[in-house]
Amino acid sequence: MSGTLTDRTIAFLVANDGIEQSELTHPWRAVCAADGRAVLVAPDRGHVQTYRHLNRMDRYPVDVTVEAADAADYDAVVLPGGVANPDILRRVPAAHRLLRQADAAGATIAAICHGPWTLIDAGLVAGRTLAAWPSLATDLTNAGATWTADRTHVDGTLITAQSDQDIDAFTALLLAAVGRSS
């Protein structure tokens, strides 16, 4: 795996609170192990707070605010879940802008669990098929998408997965997609 993401930069777009820790740290570590550069993007400077379900876990430093982020700097954008994280992030217009720019540029966007909530508010799900936590099925359908019960799904440059139980497959799809892109 080493070297497969050399010269690739992946933004991990999160709110400053409520992130499911494994959905941030597992793909982050895999990106770094493959010699990629992982960048933590959040609305506010300082730190983000992760959780394991409802239990507070670790804090991580923010590298760049979403307001200052430019999609042209990233080969992919990852949206970890956790219930609170995407529910907060979906109300951040700068996050919508970043995601729309990344999508328009053909960058890989990978969202897991509740992460697709932010994609709904960014207007990026209509006509697409996504895997997500089952409680998002109605939201995705109402936004013009198709929810699939598949554990992971790839729709063009969009990679999605249902839950932290799918993190290995989700991460492998992310690494393969970004490793193929130029």
Image (cartoon, rainbow, N blue to C red):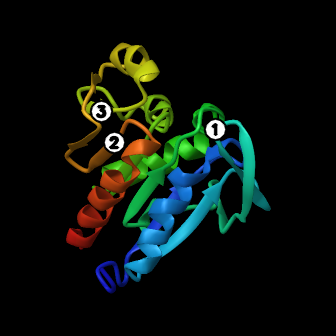
Identify the amino acid type marked 2: Thr
Q: Position of residue 62 (x, y in %)?
A: 69, 64
Q: Name above or below for residue 92 compared with residue 27.
A: above
x 32%, y 33%: residue: 131
Give 49 or 15, whichever is nearer the viewer: 49
Earlier residue among tags 3 and 1: 1
User: Mark 3 touching mark 2, by CB under 8 A?
Assistant: yes
Indicate which disc residue 80 carries.
none
Mark 3, secondary structure of its residue: strand
Q: Residues within 10 Å of mark 2 (few under 14, many from 20)?
A: many
Q: Name the residue under label 1.
A: 53
Mark 1, secondary structure of its residue: loop
x 44%, y 22%: residue: 136
Q: Quadrant of residue 178?
A: bottom left
Q: Position of residue 33 (x, y in %)?
A: 43, 79
Identify the amino acid type marked 3: Leu
Q: Mark 3 points at which residue?
A: 130
In this view, the mark in front (3 or 1): 1
Work out whether residue 157 can be spotted.
yes
Q: Mark 2 points at which residue?
A: 160
Mark 2, secondary structure of its residue: strand
